[in-house]
Image: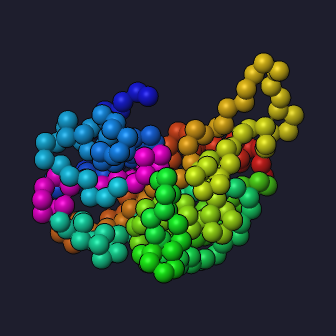
């Protein structure tokens, strides 16, 4: 994977903070995989004392907030802690699903092998609202609004609705192959079809919060290239 230059990812910057459009396959912070590259390390190559204010999954693309100083870090972190940050994700999911302000309020506990589980006895509260943006023959594009920020929250909440995120094999999502939606698509016998996306189809589309002066701001992160390509394929072949 080509390592991006941090400044090329910036979609908003002021004297106190930076918001970037995180590419997929780069962790927000150091993780258990021992990777030498992550978003915080890329950021510190440009801004010495910068801190990441939250994290999103390694495979998830989209808006990620960094603070340039301790005061801003505390301010934004408190907004996350008090659930005052407006987070909107877009997901492509398997199957047709008509959701209109569907609230999934199921507690989440830590499972095994990197998974989480719904745990009504000891899990932590988790609340996500889902709306359908566009229906296709075999898939749906959804808006996901997590009120809390639990590990894999959107992914497991969608799985409980039998709407797993496309490509999310951890929670039973299936890869997106062009042959499923394009009529007459064929490969030669010695060719192996590869999925359109090599990850699960989840993108942190918007993040809304208050700046240090109290002014509200809403940052929109354009789709990552692979997410955009998958969506265009659906709009062309699966309506």
In this orientation, does residue 221 appear?
A: no
Task: Find residue 95 and report its horizontal and vertical position in percent.
Answer: 74, 58
**Above or below — where is 30 with respect to 165?**
above
| Residue 65 painted magenta | yes
Q: Residue at x 64, y 43 (%)?
A: 230
Task: Find residue 163 and report its horizontal and vertical position in percent.
Answer: 67, 62
Q: Residue at x 63, y 69 (%)?
A: 160
Q: Residue at x 66, y 37 (%)?
A: 195
- Which corner quadrant of the image does residue 156 belong to? bottom right
Outermost right residue: 184
On the picture, is 7 further left or further right than 204? Answer: left
User: Which one is in front, 236 or 25?
Assistant: 25
User: Which one is in front, 177 or 212?
Assistant: 177
| Residue 25 painted magenta | no
Outermost front residue: 112
Q: Which image quarter holds the N terminus?
A: top left
Task: Find residue 232 and report its horizontal and vertical position in percent.
Answer: 66, 44
Task: Find residue 8 and report its horizontal and vertical position in percent.
Answer: 33, 36
Colour treatment of the image: rainbow
The number of numbered badges drawn on the structure is 0
- Which corner quadrant of the image does residue 165 belong to? bottom right
Outermost top residue: 190
On the picture, is 191 further left or further right than 203? Answer: right
In this orientation, does residue 189 appear?
A: yes
Magenta-highlighted residues = 56-73
On the picture, is 148 further left or further right than 36? Answer: right
On the picture, is 178 further left or further right than 115? Answer: right
């Amino acid at each position: 994977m080509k390592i991006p230059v941090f400044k090329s990812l910036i979609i908003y910057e002021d004297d106190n903070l930076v918001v970037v459009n995180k590419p997929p396959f780069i962790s927000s912070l150091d993780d258990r995989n021992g990777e030498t590259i992550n978003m915080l390390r890329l950021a510190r190559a440009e801004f010495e004392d910068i801190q990441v204010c939250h994290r999103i999954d390694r495979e998830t693309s989209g808006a990620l907030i960094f603070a340039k100083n301790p005061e801003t870090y505390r301010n934004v972190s408190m907004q996350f802690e008090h659930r005052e940050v407006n987070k909107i994700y877009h997901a492509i999911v398997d199957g047709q699903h008509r959701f209109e302000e569907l609230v999934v309020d199921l507690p989440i506990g830590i499972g095994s092998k990197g998974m989480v589980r719904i745990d009504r006895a000891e899990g932590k509260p988790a609340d996500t609202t889902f709306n359908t943006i566009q229906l296709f023959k075999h898939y749906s594009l959804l808006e996901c609004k997590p009120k809390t920020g639990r590990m894999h929250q959107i992914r497991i909440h969608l799985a409980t609705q039998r709407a797993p995120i496309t490509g999310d094999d951890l929670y039973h999502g299936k890869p997106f192959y062009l042959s499923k939606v394009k009529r007459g698509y064929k490969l030669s016998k010695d060719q192996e079809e590869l999925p359109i996306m090599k990850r699960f189809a989840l993108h942190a589309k918007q993040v809304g919060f208050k700046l240090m002066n109290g002014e509200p701001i809403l940052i929109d992160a354009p789709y990552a290239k692979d997410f955009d390509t998958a969506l265009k394929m659906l709009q062309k072949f699966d309506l």
